[in-house]
């Protein structure tokens, strides 16, 4: 690493910076790469271009072409070779350009990434991170706006997380890289460059655990649980609900597999009501799982059934219809009203 | 004449059979195979300066292209480019969500597209607006994808033009299967046979699906032309990031012929595509064509090519412009006069203006469209979801009225 990188990272470390989620991820990657020269970044266009979202901007310039690999255009190739590199002792961080393009790599993820450790009785570790920009709201064409995270949460052997703010983005990406298990890291792409979400990242702070959900806003009327891009929707709904005299508790799930529902159970025991929010189609999804588990654990505390606000059970529609498809604050408030009316 | 064994195991020094005076079709193919191994890599009929090169192999495939036909190809390219530029501008003005420019690739698309017959089927990727045009797909049917009102708007059977495919490489397998179907139904074997053509980029050749498509097509002798537009870049990655050898040479490893054509030469693209499609019609497919061309604009309107490529490269390719060379050839040989060029320009402007007017008047689809056509048979779950959502929206309307 060149002196200039070191000084940038050092400077960043001493500086509490106001960063967007995108910049926080970039700094998190930098910090991890500086700390361990086995960390490599790989994917389509991640080098010179800095990735189509610029999350890896400048990394190749600073760490060289062998640490930041512009790979051939093939997702099975990216993930499959990353498995081999991981087996060899590297810690690859793969970028999938958009969530809709992860499926050519699905076989490698399900068959190898998820199962190698189990199949080898723990002898082979796969310390691999797969970064996946996901979700809608960017006005894109097909395959650029989906939320396939439930498919991966369903696969034993994978860990799946999603961040919703810059502070988490900075820490969680480093923790995912440090994890000896394969982690799918779902990033809320429409929030990457949101100036409004700029937050102070203090590199000297001590982060909380990676695989834990967190209460972001306390409240008493009802609980809303969300993850990734939907967290902002939940928080906005909570602000709006305040005007109607409702106080919503908002929980950021953060970890989708393993699910950390402890804080959700605690919250529901206090509020008696839960709205589970996600952009993904609802059927057989993470929100189904949350509803089931909360029902099981909190049955006697519930004042109303768990309600879900999700994308519809259709393919992601053309972008001119996404304002209807994507759960918005109104649909969350409507669900809260329905819960209260029970 | 080189045998298939020879193109699998080339003999050093074996010259191209294509130089024989009047080659038989078999010799043409054998010659091509040999030519591709040792000879000049690029098949070209019209130089960037607009000089007509003669080819003992390919002239016969464009023997019918007189001045009038060439003027037609010129017009096609100018219209398509004009619509492309208009769409690019409309994206900048916020009327389209995104645009995928074809600038520079007009010859590859018009040449290959005009080689198709009505019974043929074309499987595009997402940049094939020129091919769409040759298949009779109205730009108005196509623009919905980029206006983000539709995923695909045309009747693919009527046009013999499959929906666009964004997931890189998927369509190569789909096309191969379609071609297998043409073969299984006995639609190959003579001049009236059917064929399939599938378009993909140089980057796509790295995908497993493309490899698998090649394997399938080879083992089932599928009548499919693999048309790779090597426009030198896969977003920021140059072709060298995908391959160590010229892409057309890969075909040999699968056991079928590959050829590299000047993708900026509409005549050569037409000739080579006709040859390849004829091979398929007669049951001698598959064939890989690598159209050597250049993406003159950004990858899409969201891309910034100044981050990864030099303007020198762009300047160099400008000299190889596919439209200018036809214009020079026509003008020099008296195939067209200024009045013709002016008329084409006027037609192109009108074509673009009509498209613009249409786009500006496009309505958003109704919300109920979200639920349409998920399944062929009704889904009770979805029907209920639709009902529920529409009545939820109605609630807003009522609230607003009070
Ligand atoms: C499976 C998949 N991975 C990634 C992408 C994102 N992507 C869209 S176009 C593109 C580059 C394609 O390059 P190439 O195949 O050469 O075709 P070109 O766009 O140059 O015509 C990439 C990486 C995608 N659409 N599908």
Image (cartoon, rainbow, N blue to C red):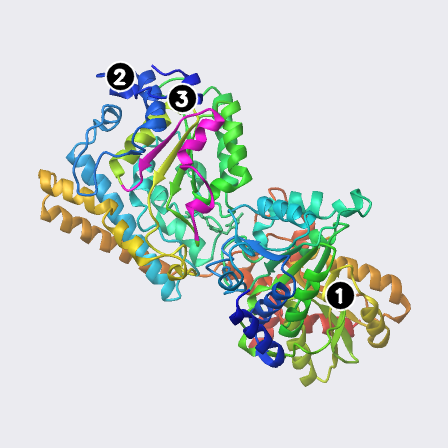
- Residue placed under numbered mark 3 in the picture: B10
Q: Does residue A131 show up magenta in the picture? A: no
- Do tag 1 and tag 3 residues touch (Cβ < 8 Å)? no
- Do tag 2 and tag 3 residues touch (Cβ < 8 Å)? no
Query: Can residue A316 be seen here?
Result: no
Q: Residue B37 lies in what quarter of the image?
A: top left
Q: Looking at the image, is A17 positioned above or below residue B173? A: below
Which residue of the protein is positioned furthest toward the front in this rendering?
A: A3
- Pointer 1: residues within 10 angstroms few (<14), some, or many (20+)? many
Nearer the camera: disc 1 or disc 3: 3
- Pointer 2: residues within 10 angstroms few (<14), some, or many (20+)? some
In the structure shown, which secondary structural element does the residue marked by tag 2 occupy? loop
Instruction: Identify the residue shown where x is 31% and y is 30%.
Output: B272
- Pointer 3: residues within 10 angstroms few (<14), some, or many (20+)? some
Q: Residue B358 got which mark?
A: none
Instruction: Identify the residue shown where x is 73% and y is 53%.
Output: A158
Q: Looking at the image, is B219 positioned above or below residue B208? A: above
2 or 3: tag closer to the N-terminus: 3
- Residue placed under numbered mark 1 in the picture: A307
Cα separation between marks 1 and 3: 69 Å
Q: Residue B223 lies in what quarter of the image?
A: top left
Residue A139: horizontal and vertical position, in percent?
A: 50, 62
Question: Which of B353/B216 is in front?
Answer: B216
Tell me whether marks 2 and 1 sit on the same chain.
no
Number of numbered callouts drawn: 3
Cα separation between marks 2 and 3: 20 Å
Q: Residue B251 lies in what quarter of the image?
A: top left
- Where's the C terminus of chain B, which quadrant? bottom right
Q: Residue B23 got which mark?
A: 2
Tell me whether marks 2 and 3 sit on the same chain.
yes
- Magenta residues? B237-264
């Amino acid at each position: 690493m060149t002196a200039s990188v070191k000084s940038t990272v050092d400077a960043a470390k001493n500086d509490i910076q106001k960063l967007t989620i995108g910049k926080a991820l970039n700094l998190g990657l930098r910090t991890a790469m500086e700390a361990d020269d086995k960390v490599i970044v790989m994917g389509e266009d991640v080098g010179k271009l800095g990735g189509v979202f610029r999350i890896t901007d400048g990394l190749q310039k600073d760490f060289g072409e062998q640490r930041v690999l512009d790979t051939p255009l093939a997702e099975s190739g990216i993930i499959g070779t990353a498995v081999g590199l991981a087996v060899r002792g590297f810690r690859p961080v793969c970028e999938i350009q958009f969530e809709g393009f992860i499926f050519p790599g699905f076989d490698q993820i399900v068959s190898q990434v998820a199962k190698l450790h189990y199949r080898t009785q723990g002898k082979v570790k796969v310390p691999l991170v797969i970064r996946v920009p996901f979700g809608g709201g960017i006005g894109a064409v097909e395959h650029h706006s989906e939320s396939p995270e439930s498919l991966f949460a369903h696969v034993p052997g994978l860990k799946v997380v999603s961040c919703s703010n810059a502070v988490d983005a900075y820490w969680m990406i480093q923790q995912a890289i440090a994890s000896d298990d394969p982690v799918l890291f779902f990033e809320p792409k429409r929030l990457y460059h949101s100036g409004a979400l700029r937050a102070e990242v203090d590199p000297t702070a001590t982060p909380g655990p990676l695989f834990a959900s967190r209460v972001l806003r306390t409240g008493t009327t009802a609980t809303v649980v969300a993850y990734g891009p939907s967290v902002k929707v939940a928080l906005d709904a909570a602000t709006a609900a305040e005007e109607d005299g409702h106080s919503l508790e908002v929980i950021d799930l953060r970890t989708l597999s393993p699910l950390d529902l402890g804080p959700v159970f605690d919250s529901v025991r206090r509020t008696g009501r839960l709205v589970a929010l996600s952009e993904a189609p609802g059927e057989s999804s993470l929100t189904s799982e949350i509803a089931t588990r909360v029902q099981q654990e909190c049955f006697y505390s519930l004042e109303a059934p768990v309600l879900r606000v999700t994308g519809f059970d259709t393919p992601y529609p053309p972008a001119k219809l996404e304002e209807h498809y994507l759960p918005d604050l109104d649909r969350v408030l409507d669900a809260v009203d329905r819960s209260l009316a029970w | 004449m080189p045998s298939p064994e020879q193109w699998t195991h080339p003999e050093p020094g074996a010259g191209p059979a294509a130089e024989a005076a009047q080659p038989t079709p078999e010799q043409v193919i054998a010659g091509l195979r040999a030519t591709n191994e040792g000879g000049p890599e690029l098949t070209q009929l019209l130089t960037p300066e607009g000089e007509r090169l003669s080819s003992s192999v390919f002239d016969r495939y464009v023997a019918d292209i007189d001045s009038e036909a060439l003027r037609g190809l010129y017009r096609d390219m100018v219209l398509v480019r004009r619509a492309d530029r208009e769409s690019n501008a409309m994206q900048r003005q916020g009327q389209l969500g995104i645009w995928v420019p074809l600038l520079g690739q007009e010859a590859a698309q018009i040449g290959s597209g005009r080689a198709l017959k009505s019974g043929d089927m074309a499987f595009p990727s997402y940049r094939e607006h020129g091919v769409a045009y040759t298949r009779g797909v109205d730009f108005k049917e196509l623009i919905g994808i980029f206006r983000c009102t539709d995923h695909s708007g045309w009747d693919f059977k009527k046009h013999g033009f499959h929906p666009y495919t964004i997931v890189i490489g998927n369509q190569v397998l789909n096309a191969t299967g379609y071609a297998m179907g043409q073969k299984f139904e006995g639609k190959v074997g003579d001049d009236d046979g059917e064929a399939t053509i599938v378009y993909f980029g140089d980057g796509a050749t790295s995908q497993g699906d493309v490899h698998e498509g090649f394997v399938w097509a080879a083992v089932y002798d599928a009548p499919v032309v693999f048309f790779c537009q090597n426009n030198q870049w896969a977003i920021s990655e140059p072709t060298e990031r995908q391959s160590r050898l010229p892409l057309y040479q890969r075909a040999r490893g699968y056991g079928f012929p590959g050829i590299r054509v000047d993708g900026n030469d509409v005549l050569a693209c037409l000739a080579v595509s006709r040859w390849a499609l004829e091979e398929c019609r007669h049951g001698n497919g598959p064939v890989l064509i690598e159209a050597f061309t250049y993406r003159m604009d950004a990858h899409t309107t969201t891309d910034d090519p100044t981050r990864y490529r030099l303007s020198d490269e762009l300047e160099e390719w400008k000299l190889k412009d596919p439209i200018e060379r036809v214009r020079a050839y026509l003008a020099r040989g008296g195939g067209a006069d200024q009045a013709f060029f002016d008329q084409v320009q006027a037609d192109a402007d009108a074509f673009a203006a009509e498209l613009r007017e249409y786009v500006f008047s496009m309505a958003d689809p109704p919300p109920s469209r979200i639920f349409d056509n998920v399944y062929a048979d009704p889904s009770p779950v979805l029907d209920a979801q639709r009902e529920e959502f529409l009545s939820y929206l109605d609630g807003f309307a009522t609230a607003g009225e009070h």
